[in-house]
Image (tube, rainbow, N blue to C red):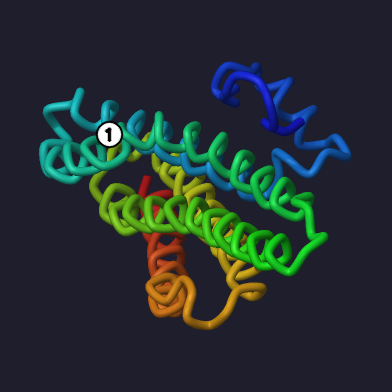
Amino acid sequence: MGFTGGARMSWASKTLQEFQDALASSDPTPGGGSAAAVALGQAAALAVMVSELTLAKESLSDGWAISEQVKSVAEPFLKTGLELATSDSEAFDAVVASFRLPRESDEDKESRRDAIRAATLGAADVPYQTAMSAMQLLKLLPELAEKGNPNAASDVGVSALLASAALKGAIFNVEINLQSLPSEMGMDMRENLPTLIEEGRIYSRMSMDAVRARLSNA
């Protein structure tokens, strides 16, 4: 189910069942990039929940600072994740549309090539935004697991797993689009991806270790 033609439609307006059915269909959108963006929003929602459960308890005041920090980062992602899910579908639809442009004359072919490249760069940029957002959240989760409400330690773990999935899944989508572009396009993304990948590995492991330590001490 794509977004070509007509008024802009948001996946946020669909039920969970409708979104899952759309993912399972043979239509190319929504795809993995949209799923990664939804995972970002879900990771953020769980992180906000754990923060609220921590802030509600005077005995957990050591965890209030990180909880407030997590909330300030995660709350905007509740909306951003859904917006990126829609934008990812639209970006891919734009790529498909660019391949359908006429190619009769040399001028047509040049214009079509430029349109394909521009649309493909856009299709890389959307999941890159998802990845950057997921990394921003993931960096905070080890401390939330360590100092947050111990009764919600498992929820921090699920949040971290979803944030990691959003990050890694989005990176896959960045890479596959950049591969088809000239090396001079998307330079910032190309330069930052190795750091994103490595930091994702580090903070995913730190989150899991912190969650497991908290569960064992509960």
In front of the other: 208 or 116: 116
Counting from the top left corner in percent of width and height, residue 72 is at 21, 37
SS category of the residue bearing label 1: helix
Residue at (26%, 42%) from the top-left corner?
73
Counting from the top left corner in percent of width and height, residue 104 is at 82, 60
* Side of 147 where 4 appears, left or right: right
In front of the other: 53 or 32: 32
Counting from the top left corner in percent of width and height, residue 209 is at 42, 63
Residue 59, relative to residue 36: is it above or below?
Answer: above
Counting from the top left corner in percent of width and height, residue 216 is at 42, 53
In the image, farthest residue toward the right:
26
Residue at (70%, 39%) from the top-left corner?
30
State the image quarter where residue 106 is shown.
Answer: bottom right
* Side of 72 where 128 appears, left or right: right
* Side of 158 where 98 appears, left or right: right
Q: Amino acid at mark 1?
A: Ser
In front of the other: 52 or 190: 190
Circle 1 sits on which residue?
51
Q: Residues within 10 Å of mark 1 (few under 14, many from 20)?
A: many
* Side of 215 where 13 appears, left or right: right
State the image quarter where residue 131 is shown.
Answer: bottom left
In the image, farthest residue toward the bottom:
183
In front of the other: 49 or 85: 85
